[in-house]
Image (cartoon, helix red, strand yellow):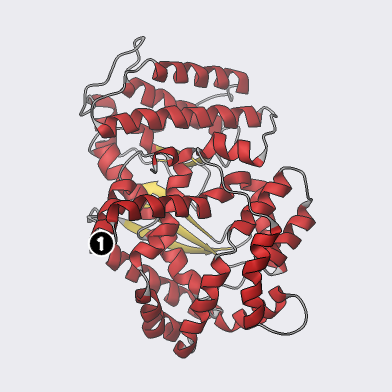
């Protein structure tokens, strides 16, 4: 996941020059005096103004400092009126001929529509889980009954026979694969360098891209990428709970390469710097962009470490670095592949909880039973529901949508998979456009 609150604002000379001094590479359509450049600036300013009411709304901003609002916060009704006016301006613009320009126009329409929905929520409107996810993320997750997860749990029951709840038996076994705290930094840096090496072999990254790693506590998430602009990220890893060996590659890919860090770097390079599309200097978290961001970050793990390659890397490198027995790597990932099939149980817990059908304690109990989350981790996940609500669909549904989109085009060719993945990362494509 990416991180929140006005990250560092970098007034990069190159960005400012392109965004404020030159026309777009393709001539913008005029409508009521509003060009795409003008609308992009209005969109950025409006996003930042909404962020003053919602501390989680603006995930990153590295555009002109003077575009940030000054003085008292504008009231929500006025912001909603501005968003409605912006949506009307976008509707009056004719679809451009160039595909990327068309995607840009559709992207801005969807982002502004999601902004309108978030403003309604800030004003007190309550949407159901599915209504909210459709309005904010341009997608709706499938619904699964308990029986769906019970069938999957039967396979794990056979692997962990005994008395007591399955989650306790599974957790007792899994605790043998915790990365010792004193080895965490070494293991994580080893994983992220491997992810970076694999990504750089297939995607052209700016030579000056970089990241910093920090370890933090008291968060509702396990890892976060704070994009700083200037091709730089701050990656934070939450150490509140034990970190298992699989999380090293997962977090390194998801937050770093080819996930959030690469996604933001390529957007900055290809859309902001090369085309001057200033709307991409701001990232509103509760928007369709997040499904693409989280979906590519999760699917990127498979792109970087397909099939046997991950297990081989874990056996030869990460398990030894963590002081774990490499001979158990295959057994561990065989179990994890079964547990991963339970991921949509998290969506069901969030749907029922946010729809008011169950309370926080029942949501945590659902996660313990059907997602096999130990109690502390389940309680942390419910806190995530409280803070980010239907955002949870972006991880598993986003991954599935991105995988289907990429694999259809790659047709089993590993290099084409990377090529299509890189094109998606560098484009303003929407979730509804993943077809």
Could you tell me residue 305's position as x and y percent? 36, 69
Q: Could you tell me if residue 276 is visible in this image? A: no
Could you tell me residue 197's position as x and y percent? 28, 67
Q: Could you tell me if residue 82 is visible in this image? A: yes
> Splitting the image into 4 quarters, where does residue 253 fall?
bottom left
Q: From this viewpoint, which residue is outermost toward the top? A: 32
Vertical placement of 10 versus 276: above or below?
Answer: below
Q: Residue at x 58, y 30 (%)?
A: 117
Q: Residue at x 60, y 32 (%)?
A: 53
Could you tell me residue 242's position as x and y percent? 60, 73
Could you tell me residue 2's position as x and y percent? 48, 51
Residue receiving disc 1:
413
Q: Residue at x 36, y 41 (%)?
A: 10
Vertical placement of 82 versus 170: above or below?
Answer: above
Q: In what element is the residue under mark 1?
A: loop
User: Is 199 placed left or right of 192 in the picture?
Assistant: left
Vertical placement of 86 versus 177: above or below?
Answer: above
Between residue 234 and residue 284, name the one nearer to us.
Answer: 284
């Amino acid at each position: 996941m990416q991180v929140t609150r006005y990250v560092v604002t970098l007034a990069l000379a190159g960005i400012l020059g392109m965004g404020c001094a030159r026309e777009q590479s393709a001539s913008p359509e005029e409508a009521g005096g509003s060009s795409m450049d003008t609308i992009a600036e209005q969109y950025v300013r409006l996003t930042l103004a909404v962020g003053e009411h919602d501390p989680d709304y603006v995930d990153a901003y590295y555009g002109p400092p003077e575009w940030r609002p000054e003085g008292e916060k504008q009231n929500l009704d006025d912001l909603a009126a501005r968003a409605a006016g912006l949506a009307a301006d976008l509707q009056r613009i004719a679809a451009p001929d160039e595909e990327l320009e068309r995607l840009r126009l559709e992207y801005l329409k969807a982002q502004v529509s999601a902004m309108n929905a978030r403003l309604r929520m800030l004003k007190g409107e309550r949407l159901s889980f599915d209504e909210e996810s459709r309005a904010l993320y341009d997608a709706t997750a499938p619904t699964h009954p308990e029986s769906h997860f019970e069938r999957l749990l039967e396979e794990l029951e056979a692997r962990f026979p005994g008395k007591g709840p399955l989650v306790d038996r599974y957790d007792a076994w899994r605790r043998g694969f915790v990365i010792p705290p004193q080895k965490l930094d070494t293991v994580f840096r080893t994983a992220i360098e491997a992810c970076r090496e694999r990504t750089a072999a297939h995607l052209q990254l700016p030579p000056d891209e970089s990241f910093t790693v920090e370890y933090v506590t008291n968060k509702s998430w396990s890892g976060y990428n704070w994009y700083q602009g200037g091709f730089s990220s701050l990656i934070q890893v939450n150490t509140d709970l034990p970190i298992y060996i699989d999380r090293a590659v997962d977090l390194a890919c998801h937050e770093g390469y080819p996930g959030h860090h690469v996604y933001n770097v390529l957007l900055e390079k290809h859309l902001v710097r090369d085309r001057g599309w200033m709307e991409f200097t701001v990232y509103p978290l509760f928007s369709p962009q997040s499904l693409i961001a989280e979906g590519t970050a999760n699917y990127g793990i498979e792109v970087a470490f397909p099939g046997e390659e991950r297990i081989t890397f874990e056996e030869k490198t990460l398990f030894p670095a963590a002081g774990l027995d490499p001979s158990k790597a295959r057994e561990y990932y065989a179990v994890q592949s079964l547990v991963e099939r339970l991921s949509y149980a998290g969506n069901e817990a969030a749907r029922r909880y946010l729809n008011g059908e169950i309370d926080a304690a029942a949501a945590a109990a659902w996660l313990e039973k059907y997602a096999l989350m130990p109690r502390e981790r389940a309680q942390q996940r419910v806190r995530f529901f409280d803070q980010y609500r239907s955002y949870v669909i972006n991880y598993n549904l986003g991954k599935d949508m991105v995988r289907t989109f990429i694999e259809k085009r790659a047709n089993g060719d590993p290099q084409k998979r990377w090529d299509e993945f890189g094109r998606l990362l560098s484009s303003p494509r929407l979730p509804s456009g993943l077809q």
